[in-house]
Image: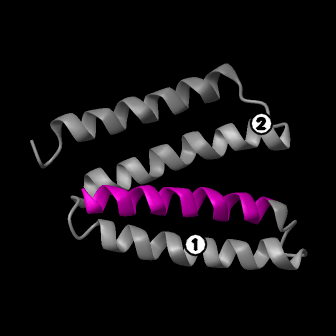
Amino acid sequence: MTGYLLLGGAIICEVFATTMMKLSNGFTVLWPSIGMVVGYLLCFYCLGKALVTIPLSVGYAIWCAVGIVLTSIIAVAFFGDKLSLQAIAGIALIIVGVIMVNVFGPSH
């Protein structure tokens, strides 16, 4: 269970860091740039610790998929990005892929 809590922390830190990257305006704004670096450092620390107890294929798949979904939601809600039907379908396929990795992956 601790592994999944750490994975959740890694996901939150990664989404935060990616959002800060956007706000850094190409690393021209100091505090978001610092936030991005700190966020990614914490993200990879938590992810590394999570992968001690979670299989790599499962942990990485969850980390990527949830990060993509949350980052896409933030991009639409706060930055006015538009998602095409094809992009939404692609995100849905990523989610289906992660479910398949979890259901049929190495731990089953």
Image quadrant holding the N terminus, namely bottom left
In percent of width and height, residue 45 lies at 43, 76
- Identify the secondary structure beneath mark 2: helix
Left or right: 34 as drawn, with respect to 46? right
Residue under label 2, please give it.
77
Left or right: 42 as drawn, with respect to 39? left
Give the residues drawn in magenta, as a range. 1-22
Left or right: 52 as drawn, with respect to 64? left
Residue 57 magenta-highlighted: no
Crowd around label 2: few <14 · some 14–19 · many ≥20 (10 Å)? few
Q: Nearer the viewer, residue 65 or 1?
A: 1
In percent of width and height, residue 13 lies at 56, 63
Image quadrant holding the C terminus, namely top left
Residue 18 magenta-highlighted: yes
In percent of width and height, residue 23 lies at 83, 62
C-alpha span from label 2 to label 1: 22 Å
Q: Examine the image and state in which quarter residue 18 appears.
A: bottom right
- Residue at horizontal 78 percent and vertical 75 percent from the top: 33
Q: Which mark is residue 40?
A: 1
